[in-house]
Image (cartoon, rainbow, N blue to C red):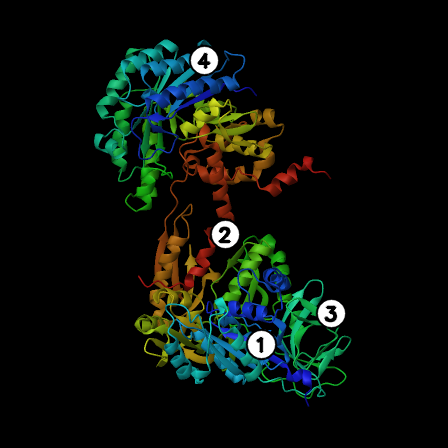
């Protein structure tokens, strides 16, 4: 059963590659719906998002309710639901798409479809969304509308005659887009009288109000004062506030089927409002939660250690605080012989890891030593049992191991065809297994490889970008575990194994990598007061060595009246540099050294 | 504390050395004349009731002898006007071999200059060209003879080592030849490649390589060994002298006591404040013309900084730092602050503690920057020990 208001709701997202014009289009839609005056446009929109903005990269989703007076004379309620744009957050994207009935696919008229866009289109199709293709920037001199149309037909299988030609920058095509949202995107179909089911598609932690859950009501309704239940976690809360963003937060007493808004219920931890979970009413629960919930598991792990042991408690507090707002961050105490006490942390991906590290260093002012990122290995022991190893230092002795399995991803890389060679070369070097290659059009190729996750966690994307002059776009999804011939490589400095430098490597690459790393550490670790041998070893056999020469002289010979201030600055800098290093045994090791084990150098 | 040392900077040169980052410009007659007027006026801004009594005067550059004899005389007149030169114990002027005439020397002798520091750098004609020095080895001998002729026997020579492509033997030969002049004072510095120099640009482009650190250290040992064999005392990291010929002026810097500085780009230290004059000569002149002190930057030194500087400057000297003197100046023992660091450095063999003095060993000097950096005090340590200013 549906009502009249529900018939006039349209929930949609915009799918676009970075720089293809998503935010410009969103701005135009806001203008068209007269949500804001021109001047408010900037100020208020940003104000409203204050909580959601992460430094530099917006990783949080948000939704806006808009009113649109359509050509048919009716007033429609639009909910524009934003999606994050990075491969680490694919699951969040899929949940926000699940809140919609339609999606606007924005494709740059000059550049065509990119891998990331394609991945999101598939997510949208999985969620049965109605897709409205928009070819943007058609006014650019380099625009090639016919080619892009062809691509849309070939790759996505949508009739490209339906594509809207637009230029969001000067407003061209915007009205058509609005009308098509009205005509093409279906209204939400849930029943108002059915037991309530609301999809949580995002949540964030506010120090004053607790967790703010973003929800799309799929069936029934929720009112202030209702006792709600989270169907996956089973936790119950009483709703104390709710509303929608227009884009300013506007309080509502009720969110009913088709509405997209937020609610608060004195929830203390975002872990209680997991993305993808279903909100129902405690006194009249739905039978089944909404489909598609997945507990997000971290894919990339690394050790975070404070440079100064005194900061250990501060680091724990920092992680506790960050966890409040980030349900996918995992951590547990870890102790390293080399680095002392710290935490083993799990992240969704590399970007996620970098964001967390940067926030700890900047917001909490704790200097960190980060070990090289690793993945979870499955190790089948000779006794038959299987354990999971997320810290290379914990890898059992090879005699005890029957088989080691590592996670593989299916990686799709889209490039202009002149870069097929370099891309395949990188993939081969990263132990990739060729899977598929398909021409998107005359110029562009989609290359698919199965690659061990451990090989892409460090510099794969950077390398890809630099080898393709920035043209490659890249997406991956976890495929599963496969047996690999892997060994643990230990690094010894001054005869002592540095556990934080141990890493897992394929046996075929072990000798080469060992040699590279011994050389690299020789350059990265500054000269000490004594000679320091560097050794790379598998088990008891040393496979590569180098020597860090002893420091011989370090003094500014000249110091007269004009040099005192300069001299002081130099000494201060030297002291600070020392403080950033970690004393392991008798050797001072800079942060870069711990990351170096994953870098691969083609020139060697 | 009253300043008893005066530094005067002459920023003119006939040729710019490839490694030099001091305030300098090509000599130009008109600018030089104006500069001398400015200097006269600048000193007047500091010295109201002259002539003042000071212990040392040092005229550095640039190249002070790039001034013409009449200009040099003007400079000496200015100095004699503001300072009681009869009571000055040490009056040094820097000079480049072959770049001064007999008339210059006559003037020096007449006005009371009693020490000359010769910027020799290296005794190898080919190499001197590399550095863009305009003198030759022969010029050096002639200059020494000329100075001695006028009774100026307190001569020092400067040398640079660890030059691009320089071998240890090459440096040794330079030193042996230098020592054959049997002078009372020598200084020698490892080449420091500073920004805004020709060497720096070449270094950045990879066109210039420094000798390996091992060689540089070996050169330092060669230097100290040779000097000591010849009866010259290693009284500061880079300075050597026969007994009684230590540079009194430079010792004031390492004693962390105040000094005047005049001229473009000069650095002074007065009333616990370090100050720097404007570097461009025309700006310096402009300020003076508007009766404004040409100071571009002032940095008051806090008690903490004074103590740190007392230590890291004082430890440059072979005699090190005396705790008695330190206590007299600051009211507590430096062991209160540095006990741990001193013990650590002693254990490393970098520092010795004898009677009330601590001093660096030769190894300690070789790693002077590491040793000095340990005398910078952490804020937390400082606040713990001296929370006297805190409102609680």
Residue that mark 4 sits on:
B88
At x 70%, y 88%, the residue is A194
From mark 4 to mark 3, how far is it between C-alphas? 81 Å
Q: Are marks 2 and 3 on the same chain?
A: yes
Is B40 or A587 nearer to us in this picture?
B40
Q: Which residue is mark 3?
A: A266
Q: Classify 10 Å Cα crowding around label 1: few (below 14), some (14-19), many (20 and above).
A: many
Residue A115 at what x, y percent from top left?
43, 75
**In the image, is B182 to the left or to the right of A502?**
left
Give the number of the disc on residue A96. 1
Image quarter in which the N terminus of chain B is found: top right
Q: CA distance from mark 1 to mark 4?
A: 85 Å
Residue holding disc 2: A583
Name which of mark 1 and mark 2 comes first in the sequence: 1
Q: Earlier in the sequence, mark 3 or mark 1?
A: 1
| Chain on which label 1 sits | A
Q: Tell me the mark number nearer the camera, choosing from 4 and 3.
A: 3
Residue at mark 3 to residue at mark 1: CA–CA distance: 23 Å
> Residue A142: percent from the left, percent from the top?
37, 69
Residue A380 visible? The answer is: no
Q: Is residue B24 above or below residue A90?
A: above
Q: Is residue B128 visible?
A: yes
Q: Quadrant of residue A347?
A: bottom right
Of labels 1 and 4, the one closer to you = 1
- Image-based side of A90 in relation to A533, left or right: right
- Across and down, in percent, residue A460 comes to 41, 68
Q: Earlier in the sequence, mark 2 or mark 3?
A: 3
Residue B174: image x %, image y %? 26, 29
Please report the residue visible at 39 percent of the width from the left and 20 percent of the height from the top: B34
Query: Residue A171 or B256: which is nearer the viewer?
Result: A171
Tag nearer the camera, 2 or 3: 3
């Amino acid at each position: 059963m549906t009502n009249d208001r529900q018939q006039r709701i349209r929930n949609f997202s915009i799918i676009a590659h970075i720089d293809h014009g998503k935010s410009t289009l969103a701005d135009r839609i806001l203008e068209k719906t007269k949500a804001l005056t021109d001047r408010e446009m900037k100020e208020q929109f940003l104000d409203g998002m204050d909580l959601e903005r992460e430094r530099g990269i917006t990783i949080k989703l948000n939704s806006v309710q808009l009113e649109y007076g359509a050509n048919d004379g009716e007033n429609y309620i639009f909910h524009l639901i934003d999606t994050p744009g990075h491969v680490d957050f694919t699951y969040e994207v899929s949940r926000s798409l699940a809140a919609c009935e339609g999606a606007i696919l924005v494709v740059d008229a000059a550049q065509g479809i990119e891998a990331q866009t394609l991945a999101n289109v598939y997510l949208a199709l999985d969620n049965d969304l109605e897709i409205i293709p928009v070819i943007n920037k058609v006014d650019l001199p380099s625009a090639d509308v016919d080619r892009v149309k062809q691509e849309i037909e070939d790759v996505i299988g949508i009739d490209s005659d339906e594509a809207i030609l637009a230029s969001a920058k000067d407003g061209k095509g915007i009205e058509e887009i609005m009308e098509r949202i009205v005509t093409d995107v279906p209204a939400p179909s849930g029943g108002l009288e059915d037991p309530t089911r609301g999809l949580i598609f995002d949540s964030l932690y506010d120090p004053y109000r607790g967790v703010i859950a973003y929800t799309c009501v799929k069936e029934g309704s929720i009112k202030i004062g209702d006792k709600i239940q989270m169907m996956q976690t089973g936790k119950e809360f009483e709703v104390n506030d709710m509303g929608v963003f227009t884009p300013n937060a506007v309080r509502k007493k009720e969110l009913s089927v088709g509405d997209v808004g937020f609610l608060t219920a004195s929830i203390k931890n975002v872990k209680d409002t997991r993305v993808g979970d279903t909100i129902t009413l405690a006194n009249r629960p739905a039978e089944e939660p909404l489909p598609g919930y997945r507990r997000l598991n971290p894919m990339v792990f690394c050790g975070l250690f404070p440079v100064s042991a005194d900061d250990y408690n501060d680091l724990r507090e920092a992680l506790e605080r960050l966890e409040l707002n980030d349900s996918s961050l995992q951590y547990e105490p870890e102790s390293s012989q080399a680095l002392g006490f710290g935490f083993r942390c799990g992240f969704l991906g590399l970007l996620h890891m970098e964001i967390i590290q940067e926030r700890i260093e900047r917001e909490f002012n704790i200097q960190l030593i980060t070990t090289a990122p690793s993945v979870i290995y499955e190790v089948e022991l000779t006794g038959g049992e299987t354990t999971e190893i997320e810290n290379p230092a914990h890898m059992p002795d090879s005699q005890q191991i029957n088989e080691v399995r590592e996670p593989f991803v299916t990686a799709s890389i889209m490039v202009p065809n002149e870069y097929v060679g370099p891309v395949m070369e990188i993939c081969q070097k990263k132990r990739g297994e060729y899977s598929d290659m398909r021409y998107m059009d005359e110029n562009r190729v989609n290359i698919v490889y199965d690659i061990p996750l451990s090989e892409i966690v460090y510099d794969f994307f950077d390398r890809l970008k630099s080898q393709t002059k920035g043209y490659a776009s890249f997406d991956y999804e976890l495929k599963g575990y496969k047996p690999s011939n892997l060994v643990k490589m230990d690094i010894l400095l001054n005869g002592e194994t540095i556990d934080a430098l141990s890493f897992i490597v394929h046996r075929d690459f072990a000798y080469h990598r060992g040699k590279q790393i011994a050389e690299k550490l020789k350059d990265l670790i500054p000269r000490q007061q004594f000679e320091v041998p560097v050794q790379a070893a598998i088990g008891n056999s040393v496979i590569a060595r180098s020597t860090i020469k002893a420091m011989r002289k370090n003094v500014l010979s000249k110091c007269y009246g004009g040099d005192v201030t300069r001299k002081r600055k130099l000494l201060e800098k030297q002291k600070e540099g020392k403080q950033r290093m970690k004393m392991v045994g008798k050797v001072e090791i800079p942060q870069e050294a711990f990351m170096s084990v994953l870098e691969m150098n083609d020139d060697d | 504390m009253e300043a008893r040392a005066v530094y005067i900077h002459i920023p003119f040169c006939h040729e710019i050395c490839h490694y030099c980052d001091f305030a300098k410009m090509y000599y130009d007659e008109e600018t030089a004349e104006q500069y001398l007027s400015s200097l006269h006026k600048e000193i007047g801004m500091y010295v109201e009731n002259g002539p003042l009594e000071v212990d040392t005067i040092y005229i550095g550059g640039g190249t002070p002898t790039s001034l013409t004899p009449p200009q040099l005389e003007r400079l000496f007149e200015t100095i004699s006007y503001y300072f009681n030169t009869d009571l000055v114990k040490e009056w040094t002027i820097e000079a480049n071999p072959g770049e001064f005439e007999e008339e210059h020397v006559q003037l020096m002798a007449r006005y009371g200059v009693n020490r000359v520091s010769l910027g020799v750098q290296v005794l190898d004609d080919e190499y001197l060209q590399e550095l863009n020095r305009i003198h030759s080895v022969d010029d050096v001998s002639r200059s020494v003879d000329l100075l001695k002729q006028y009774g100026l026997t307190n001569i020092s020579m400067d040398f640079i080592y660890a030059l691009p492509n320089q071998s240890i033997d090459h440096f040794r030969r330079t030193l042996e030849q230098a020592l054959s002049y049997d002078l009372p004072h020598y200084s020698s510095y490892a080449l420091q490649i500073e920004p805004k120099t020709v060497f720096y640009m070449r270094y950045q482009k990879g066109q210039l390589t420094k000798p390996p650190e091992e060689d540089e250290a070996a050169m330092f040992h060669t230097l100290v060994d040779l000097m000591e064999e010849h009866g010259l005392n290693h009284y500061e990291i880079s300075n050597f002298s026969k007994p009684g010929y230590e540079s009194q002026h430079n010792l004031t810097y390492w004693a962390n006591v105040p000094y005047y500085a005049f001229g473009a780009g000069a650095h002074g230290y007065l009333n616990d404040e370090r100050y720097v004059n404007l570097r461009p000569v025309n700006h310096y002149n402009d300020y003076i013309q508007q009766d404004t002190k040409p100071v571009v930057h002032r940095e008051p030194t806090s008690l903490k900084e004074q103590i740190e500087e007392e230590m890291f400057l004082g430890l440059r000297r072979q005699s090190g730092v005396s705790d008695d003197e330190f206590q007299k100046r600051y009211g507590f023992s430096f062991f209160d602050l540095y006990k741990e660091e001193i013990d650590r450095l002693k254990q490393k063999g970098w520092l010795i503690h004898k009677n009330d003095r601590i001093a660096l060993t030769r190894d300690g000097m070789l790693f002077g920057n590491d040793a000095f950096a340990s005398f910078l005090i952490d804020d937390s340590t400082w606040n713990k020990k001296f929370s006297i200013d805190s409102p609680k």
